[in-house]
Amino acid sequence: MNVVLLLKLLLVPCLIYGVTLAGRRWGQAVAGWLSAFPIVAGPILFTLTLEQGAGFAANAAQGTLLAVVAILVFSLAYAWAALRFGVAGSMALALLAYAAAVAALQRLDLPLAVAFVLVWAALLLARRLFPQDAAGPAGTPARGDLPWRMFAAAALVLAVTTGAAHLGARLSGFFAMFPVMSTVLVGFAHAGSGRGSAVALLRGMVVGYFGFAVFCVTLAMQLREGAVGAAFALALGCALVVHLVARRMLAPPLTAGLAKTS
């Protein structure tokens, strides 16, 4: 089995498990923030570096950076669609919007610095574009749904990876950032706890993607210098700092999440 696929199959369901538990303890905004850290993308890009070389992985990291914009389109489309539709309708519209964004973005050939500025501008703007009042009827969280979440994540990884193999190199790079985590976490949150829970999770993801973008741009720059181990260590370190700072500056305090779950 391909090493990248094996990593996805092992890491994504495990991350779904951990993030779900965090969301039940501290709230969905915290779960979204945690899910955006490059725990999955980091090992996958590292494997690509070993298999294809540093130059290939640097280009892949740059494509992954730009793909954040498509995930923001997915998030906003879902949040607004959820005001009128249930899980199935909201997810269908969000995935259509994501596909349209990928189709547009994969035609762009931007310098790394320009792509980074574009992504950060999109992140700052996206925070203001979520519906102001997304509260709706709350459901009862299903405590026994963790195995189903993990199974859904693994199945989605297999489907996306199989499909991406037939899309060509550049488009496959974008679909390597297919919102598997978002699809599973948001869908189950919406179904179990209502649209307000799903939108809170999506807002938290936006806060987390600031650090993710820093990881991608740092890795792309450092891999072109040739020191693989140092490149990944620096990229993860910078991402962690920005991840924590963004949470402190842009998100509600952790006590707010605790109050919601108490």
Image (cartoon, rainbow, N blue to C red):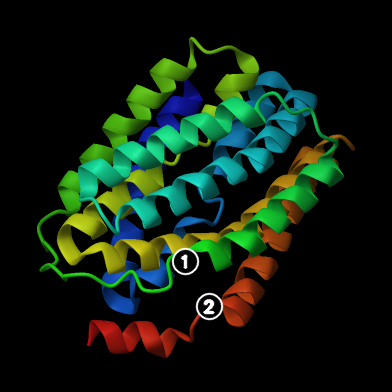
Q: Is residue 114 left or right of residue 5?
A: right
Quarter of the rendering occupied by the C terminus: bottom left
Disc 2 residue crowd, few under 14, some 14–19, many 20+, Cα 10 Å = some
The amino acid type found where label 1 is placed reads Gly
Query: Which residue is tagged 2?
Result: 251
Picture disc at residue 91: none
Residue 258: horizontal and vertical position, in percent?
A: 33, 86
Q: CA distance from mark 2 to mark 1?
A: 7 Å
Tell me the element at label 1. helix
Q: Are marks 2 and 1 in contact (CB under 8 Å)?
A: yes
Picture disc at residue 204: 1
Query: Is 124 above or below relative to 73?
Result: below
The amino acid type found where label 2 is placed reads Ala
Name the residue: 53% across, 78% down.
251
Query: Is 213 above or below relative to 240?
Result: above
Of residues 183 and 145, the one nearer the viewer is: 183
Disc 1 residue crowd, few under 14, some 14–19, many 20+, Cα 10 Å = many
Name the residue: 22% across, 70% down.
136
Q: Is residue 167 left or right of residue 57?
A: left
Among the 4 quarters of the image, the one containing residue 17: bottom left
